[in-house]
Image (cartoon, grey):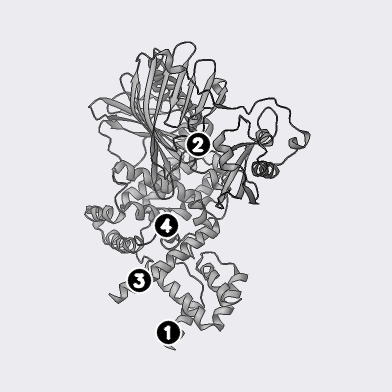
Amino acid sequence: MSSLLFAERVAVEPEVTPSAGQDRWEGAWPRSREEFSRFVDVFQDRLVWFAFRKLGNRSEAEEVVQEVFLRAYRHQEERGNVARVSSYLYRMASNACNDVLRKRGRAALPLSLSMAENIADPRAQADENAAALDELQRIETLLAHLPRRQAEAMRLRILDELSFAEIAEVLHCSLGTAKSRFRHGLRKLRAILELEREK
Amino acid sequence: MNCRAVRKHLVDLLDVACDTQEHEALMAHLHACPQCTEEFATMKRAMEGVRPKHRIGASPALKEIVMKEVLESAASVGSAGRTSRRARLWRPLFAAPLAAALLLAASFGYWLIQSGGKEPLSAFGVLGRAAHAMQGLKSVHIEAQMRTIPGDNFELILLDQDMVPIELWRGFGEPPQWRVETSGRVVVCDGNTSLLWIKKSNVASEAPPTAGHIGWLAPLMDVEHILDSELQLAQEQGSTVTVEEVTGPDGSRELLVSVEALAQGDYTNDWLLNKSISDSDNLRVYRLDADTMWLKGLQVYVHTDAEDVLVFETVNIEYNAELPSTLFALELPDDVSWYDSQGETAVPAQVQKLTPEETARAFIEACGREDWNTVQVFYPVAPIPQHFKEALGGIQLVSLGTPFQSGQFPGWFVPYEIRLKNGEVKKHNLTVRNDNAAGIYQVDGGI
């Protein structure tokens, strides 16, 4: 019964995303400087985290996000018809991160290896960065067992806290496919975690 | 809701945004069902297993820098010739060996290149120099590779395919001539006519030089204007252009012109997304000799959610070699079939009214009946090739789906399921379009 009590306590609450209390941007592409200022407030932490986990380096992550915001501002009129601003912004950030990886010349390196190098970066020795990198490395090791698309859906939902609708747009797939990738990924992850516990 | 239905939808309880009605129904079930409750608890525990406890956020300086740049950007519009350098947070992001790279929004109407200690150079000037330097060209021969199928058109890219070798020749005399060839397809233009031959299916097509036989490769045939074309596209489509001066592998000075472009169509249905360069978010990197301004190379990457995929790259570019006139002529087999979508054959009145779905049905059923005269109304190839008859004669239509559009393609895609003569069931999308002389929907692909 004890497991049931525990399960009931956990289960009856739907998912509570840690950042659920933070602002989300539900409006159209920002059209004035004031709107843009709030736009930056809403997205800056989320995008820096997104870029950081892809690049494993905080300064590069901030550079990328800076660039993404400036592109967003410069092309605000052309992007006026973008249906969901958040997913479009994540795609821009993803592309910008890929550029950085390509220019580093090690885009093909597993993320865990890239991170291992960055831990040696003096700037990344700061406790906060190092702790985040350590943790990301552990998470990536687990996700590496999943098919690539399922792992990416898991990252976007759990690490970046995107909704399934946003994930579908970032990954260019239907809502059902996004949920399905997540569901299958989660099932595999459960099995992996159980194996880890048994070791 | 029974347990099976609930478990299928438990993932909805793990979404960020909650649909109250659906969640209430699910939670009501969970309260009453220990097994589903345990299942959901296990899912949440698995999520917790990969949820980071430490997160990195933006530094306090980020917003300040962004907003400062925004103000400066607004002030600099129209002030051509002014150099603007991005404030950097910690250190220069890319340390180019020779010079700084400036990111320049083409929509501002000016680009700049700045070289260490030198006067800034207008990118319009760079492009002008490139076009001028190329004006004396007699010929160019490009060896390249493209991620596609050897026999398919020069537009299609398939990210999971191997690279296919491709060769292009262009003579700059009057009239201009060219030839583009892979192992499965060749196009020659003698200056007046473009002749396409699909080798394996032995189908040919003759059309004006502007007919689009060479697809996305057309700009490479205008190598002297290629950067000019990119500038125009950047202004029309909002691509972003970076010009960077670097040291080449042989120590020479090179200019890298990088064009970041977004997919240019409507991808509500994403069937066409990433199936051609213009149907993808892509990066095109041109490498120019900084002294002669001649194009030394081109690479094209498609951005996907997971990675960047190299889909086209030049292997070698040779200028001003003697090109024999035989290169721009094509000897076709005697039994070649001809494709003519612009033919003026009489079309029955009822065909003119057919919708894309009705066209697909009529075409597939005509194949099934082996009624090749009717097939030719929708697939204007004469004679119908024998391999086509063998493959499609006797097929059975299983089902048709709802037609859809995707990307920039002007026609429709009709999902279909057919049973082949050997019993195998095949599902695909038939491509139909009606921008032809007869104005009826004709089959353009997906067979």
Tell me which label, 1 or 4, sits earlier in the chain: 1
Judged from this view, the residue extending furthest toward the top is B174
Going 45% across and 17% down the picture, which residue do you hit?
Answer: B328
Q: CA distance from mark 3 to mark 4?
A: 18 Å
Q: Chain of mark 4?
A: A
Residue B79 x/y as whole percent = 46, 27
Where is residue B445 shown, x and y percent of the image? 57, 38
- Secondary element at image label 2: loop
Callout 2 crowding tier (Cα within 10 Å): few <14, some 14–19, many ≥20: some
Q: Which residue is mark 4?
A: A152
Neighbor class of circle 1 (other Cα within 10 Å; few <14, some 14-19, many 20+) is: few
For residue B286, what is the image quadrant? top left
Residue situated in front as seen by the camera: B384 or B47:
B384
State the CA–CA distance, disc 4 to disc 2.
Answer: 25 Å
- Residue at image point 39% right, 44% down: B308
Amino acid carrying label 1: it is: Ser
Please tell me the numbered disc located at residue B333.
Answer: none
Does residue A137 lie above or below B247 as drawn? below
Q: Which residue is mark 1?
A: A3
Pointers 3 and 2 in contact (C-beta within 8 Å)? no
Q: Where's the C terminus of chain A, which quadrant?
A: bottom left
Residue at image mark 2: B278
Using the rendered view, name the quadrant where residue B44 is placed. Answer: bottom left
**Amino acid type assigned to the residue bearing label 3 in the image:** Leu
Q: Amino acid at mark 4?
A: Glu
In the image, A87: left or right of B163? right
Secondary structure beneath label 3: helix
Q: Earlier in the sequence, mark 3 or mark 4?
A: 4
